[in-house]
Image (cartoon, grey):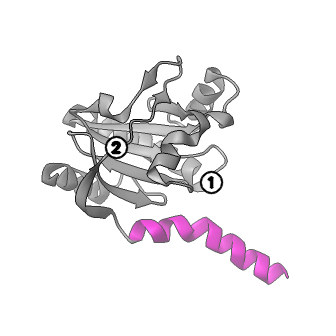
């Protein structure tokens, strides 16, 4: 029984890196992003098309997801390295996870990600519109607000090869 539990725990802890090794899923045809609203920490509503003009990386995450928490500092460094190059990274989590806006801010600060823009998805409507039911799950959106691909699982975002691949994808779409 203990061996089965240890095997299960090992698989859970390392499943995200195996998914990331599979690479990015770029679609043959881009598609419109949903019109669903997300909300910043002040309650202001946004739609993904409000970020048109930037290459948008939308990371769906959860505060109870170990791979999501592990990649927060990587996401933070990635965002810092790419912010002046037309790449915008945002975090989207379910509004049900947070009692107050300060709770989310403090959580991100605790994990070295206070510089990231975080939004809440009331009722998980945006995640549902994308058909996303697991986290971390990343949606890639080009400058014209068209979804061009996804990444399922955690990524070493601040790795130079990952950054180079994101720049290549941005330039191609």
- Between 78 and 46, the residue placed more toward the observer is 46
Label 1: how many Cα within 10 Å (few below 14, some 14–19, many 20+): some
Instruction: State which quadrant residue 169 falls in.
Output: bottom left
- Between 100 and 163, the residue placed more toward the observer is 100
Determine whether, in the image, residue 96 is placed left or right of residue 21: right
Determine whether, in the image, residue 173 is placed left or right of residue 22: left
Measuring from the top left, give residue 88's x and y in whole percent: 31, 36
- Between 67 and 172, the residue placed more toward the observer is 172
- In this picture, is 169 found above or below 15? above
- In this picture, is 15 found above or below 130? below
Looking at marks 1 and 2 on the same chain, the residue that comes earlier in the sequence is marked by: 2
Residue at x 28%, y 59% (from the top left corner): 161
Residue at x 22%, y 59% (from the top left corner): 29
- Between 55 and 76, the residue placed more toward the observer is 55
- According to the image, label 2 marks what residue? 33
- According to the image, label 1 marks what residue? 66
Measuring from the top left, give residue 85's x and y in whole percent: 20, 36
- In this picture, is 27 found above or below 117? below
Secondary structure of the residue carrying numbered label 1: helix
Given this view, does label 1 or label 2 mark the residue nearer the observer?
Answer: 2
Span colored in magenta:
1-21
The verdict on residue 16 being magenta is yes
The verdict on residue 173 being magenta is no
Residue at the right extreme, as displayed = 1
Determine whether, in the image, residue 88 is placed left or right of residue 121: left
Instruction: State which quadrant residue 20 falls in.
Output: bottom left
Q: Is residue 60 visible?
A: no
Q: CA distance from mark 1 to mark 2?
A: 27 Å
């Amino acid at each position: 029984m203990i061996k089965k539990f240890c095997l299960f725990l090992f698989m859970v802890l390392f499943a995200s890196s195996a998914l990331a090794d599979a690479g990015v899923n770029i679609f043959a045809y881009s598609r419109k992003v949903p019109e669903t609203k997300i909300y910043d920490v002040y309650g202001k509503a946004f739609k993904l098309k409000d970020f048109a003009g930037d290459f948008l990386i939308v990371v769906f995450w959860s505060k109870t997801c170990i791979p999501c928490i592990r990649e927060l500092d990587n996401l933070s460094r990635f965002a810092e390295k790419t912010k002046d190059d037309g790449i915008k990274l945002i975090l989207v989590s379910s509004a049900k996870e947070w009692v107050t806006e300060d709770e989310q801010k403090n959580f991100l600060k605790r994990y070295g990600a206070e510089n990231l823009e975080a939004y809440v998805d009331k009722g998980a409507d945006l995640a549902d519109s994308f058909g996303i039911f697991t986290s971390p799950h990343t949606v890639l959106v080009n400058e014209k607000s068209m979804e061009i691909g996804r990444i399922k699982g955690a990524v070493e975002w601040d790795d130079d090869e990952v950054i180079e691949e994101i720049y290549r994808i941005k330039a191609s779409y």
